[in-house]
Amino acid sequence: MGIRTYCVLESRYVRLMDIVDQRLYCLGMEMLIGCAIESVSQDTKKGACMNKTKKILNDPKNVVPELLEGLVDAYHGQVRKLDGVNAVVKSKLPKDKVGLLVGGGSGHEPLFAGFIGRNMADGAACGNVFAAPSPDIILSATKALNQGKGVLYLYGNYAGDNMNFDMAAELAAEEGIATQTVRVWDDVASAPLERMEDRRGIAGDLFVIKIAGAVSAQENDLHEVSRIASKARDNTRSMGIALSAGSLPETGEPTFELPDDEIEIGMGLHGEAGVSREKMLTADALVEKMMHRILSDLPFESGYEVCLLINNLGASTMMELLLANRKAQQILRDKGISVHDTLIGSYCTSQEMAGFSITLMRLDNELKSYYDMPAQSLALVKA
Amino acid sequence: MAILELSAQDVRKMFLYVSQRMVESKDLLTQADKAIGDGDHGVGMARGFGAVAEKLEGQSFNTVGELLKTIGTTLLMSVGGAAGAVFGTFFSGGAKNLGDAPSLDSRVLSHMLLDGLEAVKQRGGAKVGDKTMVDALQSAAMKSEDMSSAPLSESLSAVAGAAEQGMEKTKEMTASIGKAKTLGERSLGHADPGAISTYLILKFMTEFVTERDAPR
């Protein structure tokens, strides 16, 4: 093991030497030494190797356009990809409809483009893997969706998405297209309640898209669509945990290091740190921790009605998700909270990250009526 | 002999050189971003500066502003994510008040850095101490003001040095903006990848100018 680690370092050392001068080389060496210590300690701990993650791809630089082509084909004519940009929109849009544009970095499939469909989103602007789409992509999709009633931007709350969607909104305004923005910030682990607007958007995106899609199919007033989508967002809370990292297709490298016997509580969708790292737990103990944080945040109280989502981050098994669901439902029953609908599956992923997130959305009569509307998209179908 | 200024065409050559060196820095930036971010900074910057090189190849520019705007728009459209928005805004914002300036001297450099900094702060809302590229850029922009009547070769190297100091300081900061913000103390000891890129861009600009400066 020691020899292999040495070899890996040696080859990186040579590559770095080729490209950086002495000072930068020192900067690089600091990182390498960090890596070396980490990999040696991990090697001795668990016999890990530093092989790149296996993925079946063509040219890694082309994964986004290629996955969108695959997605468009799966829609059998209902959606089309825009020329020259990574954006997908419905082939036919009803006249006078408020457009619902979702989007964000790729690599979280089926989020976002997989949620285009009847009573769902109208289009998706797709960035590179884990990177927000650029303003030109968003603007092209905005123009394609605008039917004179404006376009609602709905996306996860990240610095990159916020800046790029804001720039696109400014460009759209110059062209006379009205837009409004709803940022999803459901991840309770990412900032305290008083700094709600610093929270990340994770799997709760799905519930907000479901509601916004239904509203935008019925209401042709941008403000009204935005108001109800915001209400769905404000009643949604999530939290995730991760057992192991996903990797970027272009580098093959995991986005974070986590020892085999540890679990990150509150892990973000791109490997952002959560609230703590702990030794492995049982499904029941883990779900109890997660549910405690989620329930106390809104807070969800006895008598409430909720939708529940157990979302796979990529590599976890349906078996584990079902165990998580078992405990989550027990806790909700004990609390006197009734579950109106349950979704279990891979909706908002992070490549091959192992782990899952739990999302609750509190329903009132208005949200419930929109939630219950049928929906037809690649990744979510409701009769 | 010190270099006083570069013509727009030479600035184009300088950014072709900077682009090539940024593409070569991909692995270094990937490792830096992996430590506290999601590991895509190297890929994004390499993609962006690859696109810049393609764009600048075979084009000619009459003014520095026109060239910087082209670089900014290209980065904005090709990098994506927060980095695309911020570095695109830096170059486009830096071009804003350069008017018809046909060449880059220390005064123009200072305008570019100060206006670029202001635009980045407005777009991203980051301030000094948030552990972002603003820490390197602010330090560079302040230095450029002091050096605005010096020869370009001297001001650039001083500015790159200041950017390096600003970048180094980010190691002692905990992130309060961007994807690293929830790391808290775990981000200590690591430089911000955007600050490293800011330093590298200025450092490679300096290399191009001082290599011309060397006796031949």
Image (tube, coloured by chain):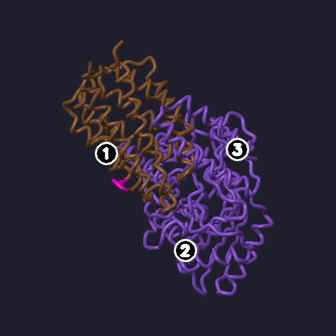
* Chain where mark 1 sits: B
- Residue B120 drawn at (x, y percent): 35, 46
Mark 3 against mark 2, which lies toward the viewer? Answer: 3
Q: Residue A366 carries which label?
A: 2
Can you tell which chain is drawn purple?
Answer: A
- Is B122 displayed left or right of A371 in the figure? left
Give the residue type at disc 2.
Answer: Glu
Instruction: Report the magenta stretch's main SS.
Output: loop
Tag 2, which secondary structure?
helix
In front of the other: A169 or A324: A324
Task: Quarter of the image for the C terminus of chain A: give it.
Answer: bottom right
Q: Are discs 3 and 2 located on one and the same chain?
A: yes
Task: Tell me the kind of residue under disc 1.
Answer: Ser
Q: Residue at x 22, y 32 (%)?
A: B107
- Give the residue number, with chain letter if any, for mark 1: B139
Q: Can residue B144 be seen in this view?
A: yes
User: Looking at the image, which is closer to me, A307 or A240?
Assistant: A240
| The stretch drawn in magenta includes residue B127 | yes
Left/right of residue A271 with respect to residue B94 in the rendered view: right
Chain hosting mark 2: A
Q: Where is residue B141 in the image (x, y as percent from the top left)?
A: 28, 41
| Cα distance between the residues tagged 1 and 3 | 38 Å
Residue B6 vertical placement versus A355 (above, below): above
Q: Kindly give the residue lying farthest to the top in the view shown.
A: B216
**Residue indicated by mark 3:** A5
Residue B164, position in %: x, y? 38, 42
Element type where label 3 sits in the image: helix
Question: Which mark is in front, 1 or 2?
Answer: 1
Q: Mark 3 lies on which chain?
A: A
Q: What stretch is highlighted in magenta?
A: B125-129
Task: Output the letter for the chain in brown.
Answer: B
